[in-house]
Image: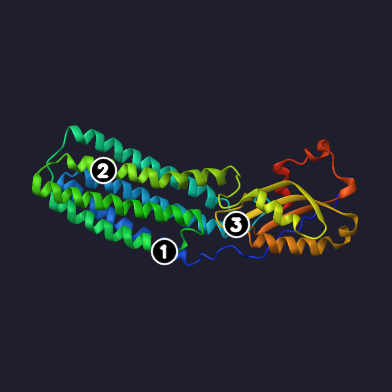
Amino acid sequence: MGHSHDHSGHHHDHAPKLDHLNTAFFVGIVLNLAFVVIEAIVGLAQNSLSLLTDAGHNLSDVASLALALLAFKLSKMRASNTYTYGYRRSTIVVSLLNAVILVAAVGIIAYEAILRIGHPEPISGITVAWVAFAGIAVNGVTAWLFIKDKEKDLNVKGAYMHMAVDALVSLGVVVSGIIIYFTKWYWIDSAVSLIIVVAIIAGTWQLLMDSIRLEFDGVPKQMDVENIKQELLKAEGVKDVHHLHVWALSTTENALTAHLVLDAGSMSNFNNIKKDLRHRLEHLEIQHSTFEPELSEDHCTQTVCTLDTPSEQHDHDH
């Protein structure tokens, strides 16, 4: 066929700058780790299963924050001959892992609550309420650190969800502690936990689905392949677009590869066509693009086209 493959990687750095999040993750880890220790000590002293369960849940959040911070560090590492994309994808792996941890932690809370509802143990409602109130402050402050960046990166959204969920759990524990203090209805503790579990699952499900989509090289949720194709067809000289692939390199960067069918007069102007297309794609949040030109009269047959598999398409970039 004699196609001239364009392998020039597009390196304009239009991904959101999230370097300030290093501090947010570090502060969040320190605050939550300190609270886990306090909550566990008081939970053991008061024989409060709800506080111990919450401490375990908070510990899973510390692990999640540490993983997210590690992913950010890895995503900054340079590409090598072995890892030609660098370690950007670690952010996607971690966002999925964090969503799974969150769902697992919720499962443990639900299991404990169901066990306790039939066998409630006497606890000091007021002590539980005060410790949980401190938890609202710790988790609230940590969630606030991530709130303005949560829509820019799935990892940050995961961290925010973990913290917001924990603040909600702590609020439930405060309410149950106050009710227990006045009524001695110890089963309230478990009932509130189960209500919180339902709320958490409802809020976390989309995060899990988004993470799975990116892990399997799905088109990022906010993008529409047909819209992207129509935008490419607007470029002068582009007659058709096929073998269009869009996927996420990381939780902040997206890539595209496509075969462009050009008329004969446009082949010599291919560099300008590329510049125009890349500018258009930047506005669609696609930072890395690779194009393969084809003459309209030399349109590849289905047999030849299918030899270019999606995994080979990935190799075209950079």
How far is disc 3 from disc 1 in space, using C-alphas?
21 Å
Identify the secondary structure beneath mark 2: helix
Q: Earlier in the sequence, mark 3 or mark 1?
A: 1
Is 246 rendered above or below residue 283? above
Question: Which is closer to the viewer, label 3 or label 1?
Answer: 3
Q: Quadrant of residue 164?
A: bottom left
**In the image shown, does 137 or 221 lie closer to the viewer?**
221
Per the image, the residue denoted by label 2 is 193
Q: Residues within 10 Å of mark 2 (few under 14, many from 20)?
A: many
Instruction: Name the spot of residue 249 as percent of width and height, x first.
Output: 61, 52
- Identity of the amino acid at label 2? Ser
Identify the secondary structure beneath mark 1: helix
Q: Quadrant of the N terminus?
A: top right
Pointers 1 and 2 in contact (CB under 8 A)? no
**In the image shown, does 125 or 151 lie closer to the viewer?**
151
Question: Which residue is pictured at 47% across the width and 44% down the height?
Answer: 208
Q: Which mark is residue 86?
A: none
Instruction: Name the spot of residue 155 as percent of width and height, x first.
Output: 48, 54
Q: Earlier in the sequence, mark 1 or mark 2?
A: 1
Question: Which residue is pictured at 56% across the width and 52% down the height?
Answer: 222
Question: Which residue is pictured at 49% across the width and 45% down the height?
Answer: 96
Per the image, the residue denoted by label 1 is 24
Q: Which mark is residue 253?
A: 3
Q: Earlier in the sequence, mark 3 or mark 2?
A: 2
